[in-house]
Image (cartoon, grey):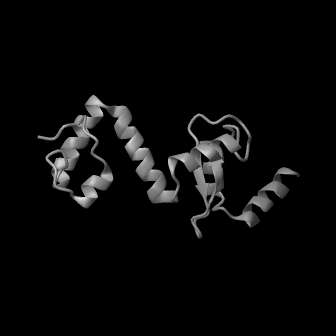
Amino acid sequence: MLNPKSDFTLDDFLNRRDSKNIPKSVKQARAYRAKLKKFNPQKLSHQDRKANLKYKYNLTIQEWDKLFEKQDGKCAICRYPMKRPVVDHDHDTNRVRGLLCNSCNVALAKFCDSIELLNRAIIYLQK
């Protein structure tokens, strides 16, 4: 039986080390995650965040924290304090540009990260 309080990580599952606390199938992993979510949601959240940052942006939690501190906890565009910062990155090179608030991130996405479209919007707003 899986122990949701063990130190099981995603790497452990992917490497499938021999241990009674490590699931051997996707079904077991899902059952483990459900138990972990119930008994230790902070641990699951931390593991998910760590894996997500590494997989999507090749960032460690420490690098993310440094970026957050460098921006004083404020959005790189509007400079308002961020409640839930979003990692902004170049979709072509995958290079991280900074942390944004959700509103600024969505705005950039609507303009397809196009400098030309953003310049047209600036000209339009100046009318």
- Left or right, 53 with reference to 4: right
Residue 75 in sight in this render: no
Q: Quadrant of residue 120?
A: bottom right
Where residue 76 appears, x then y in whole percent? 71, 47
Please state which of residues 108 and 43 is positioned toward the viewer in this rendering: 43
Residue 47 in sight in this render: yes
Residue at image x 16%, y 55%?
Answer: 18
Q: Residue furthest right?
A: 127
Where residue 95 appears, x then y in whole percent? 61, 63
- Left or right, 28 with reference to 125: left
Q: How many marks?
A: 0
Q: Is residue 32 above or below residue 114?
A: above
Q: Which quadrant of the rendered structure holds the N terminus?
A: top left
Q: Quadrant of residue 68?
A: top right
Where residue 48 appears, x then y in whole percent? 39, 46
- Left or right, 34 with reference to 73: left
Q: Residue furthest front?
A: 18
Residue at image x 26%, y 36%?
Answer: 36
Residue at image x 18%, y 50%?
Answer: 23
Q: Residue furthest bottom?
A: 92
Q: Residue furthest top?
A: 39
Where residue 13 appears, x then y in whole percent? 25, 54
